[in-house]
Image (cartoon, rainbow, N blue to C red):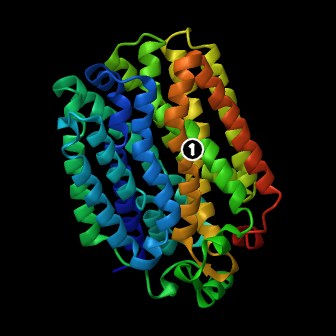
Amino acid sequence: MCSSYLQGWVFFLTWIAYASTYLLRKPLGVVKADLAASMHLTRTELGWLDTALLLPYATLQMIAGSSSDRFGSRKTLGICLLISSLSMVKFGSQQSVYMMAMMLFINGAAQSQAWPSCVKAIGKWFSQTERTSIFGIWGTCTFGGGVMGTMLAVHLQAQYGWQSAFLYPSMIVGFVGCLVLSSLPSPPTNHQLLPHNKDEDKQDKEAVQSDSLTWKQLWAIPMLKEVCMSTFCVKIVRYCMYMWLPMYLYQQLHYDKQKAGMLSTSFEIGGVLGSATLGIAINRYFHGRQVLGTAMVILLSAFAFLFFHLTSSWGDYINVTWMVLAGVFNCGVDPILSGSLAAELGERNGYNAQGSVSGIINGFGSLGTVLQGPIVGAIAENYGWPGMLYTMIALSVAGSAAALKGSYARTPTVWEMHPT
């Protein structure tokens, strides 16, 4: 079977697989107002439910990110999707907030291995010179999945009540998990199938497997710390929008629940656009200096959030415009930071640790998603919704500064040494 067909299938199947994880993440943000009303929960308590989902998601990526390096992407990804599906299928029928928290915890733990597995699979099927553009386009799964997850949850909530927003998505995720287990191809054993160069051949011959590396050795990889810190800031902002934007639009801007849920997808639509185009644009205009380009883009996201806040009373079209732009600049850098850059860093010094490095970066970034729940809930409770938005602006500036620092501490990539 020709390599181009297999590359296309790996790209498509991993895109669908990772997008499907958002079908079981996004409903919690959509149903928050109804969940709070039916179970008499405060915003701070709702924030702790976010933490129940995102704490294991973040920590297990860093601790167990090498699972895909050790057991392979197909088994790791397929099993994690099946566990995620089974954990949430009965979520809507629970009457105990503690049981809900336990189910969210299991779901987050299972989904923690999805991103490293996908990065490992894509990294093995595409050459280094292709990855920035490929990961940018592939990364639309994050935001495409978010849009689909939100729209499906809004529809199910409106038609059948908030409890149903978890049942049908669980069935879809289970089906995708079976598809991955049965048909995701193994990495090519003959490297001649893929475009490559002498540097990559040399790296393959001298590769050090990730399970022989300590966490300290991985953490010492140049530029990894700055990329982790930038990802941390970007993700805390992104998940703040994911988990609280529908409630903000409903309570602060006084949209009805269904319209608030639908309008909130404009942020993720911006993410799709940014993910698909920013990788290509950064390669073109920054000549492969991915981190410097990323720093500039994150800074633009801070301005987008500022103008969104200042013009929030100007009506639907202005709100949607700034939410789309915020999504372009905030979400569009995510596939670069935790995708193409992670794959590149995982191959430095002769390492074969793409999954492990991706797990560290995405896991460290996801610690921000853990903190956003209780922190944003408390800020909104005590300082109102404007306090939340100014916090996101400050975090975006900090993420830009971290990436800027990393851009001057890095070593040349294969792309820069051998431009096409």
* 119 with respect to 311 (left or right): left
Residue 396 lies in quadrant: top right
Percent x, y for residue 259? 36, 18
**Image quarter (top left, top right, bottom left or bottom right) of the N terminus:** bottom left
Q: Nearer the viewer, residue 273 or 245?
A: 245
Of 44 and 35, the residue lying toward us: 44
Query: On the picture, is 301 further left or further right than 178?
Result: right
Q: Residue at x 25, y 60 (%)?
A: 82
In the rendering, at what x and y percent does residue 207 appear?
60, 85
Residue lying furthest bottom in this view?
A: 205
Which residue is drawn at the image coordinates 62% and 38% (left, top)? 329
Q: Amino acid at mark 1?
A: Gly
Identify the element where label 1 is drawn. helix
Residue 368: horizontal and vertical position, in percent? 57, 44
**Quadrant into which the C terminus falls:** bottom right
On the rendered structure, is 164 left or right of 200? left
Q: Residue furthest right?
A: 408
Which residue is drawn at the image coordinates 35% and 65% (left, top)?
Answer: 77
Residue 273 visible in the picture: no
Q: Residues within 10 Å of mark 1 (few under 14, many from 20)?
A: many
Instruction: Place residue 318 in its image quadrant.
Output: top right
Is residue 159 placed above or below 340 in the rendered structure?
above
- Residue 255: x, y in percent? 40, 12
Q: Residue at x 26, y 42 (%)?
A: 99
Front-most of 270 and 22? 22
Vertical side of 366 occupied by 266: above or below? above
Vertical comparison of 387 with 132: above or below? above
- How many numbered discs sit on the rendered protein? 1
The residue that mark 1 highlights is 368
Q: Does any portion of residue 303 appear in the rendered image?
A: yes
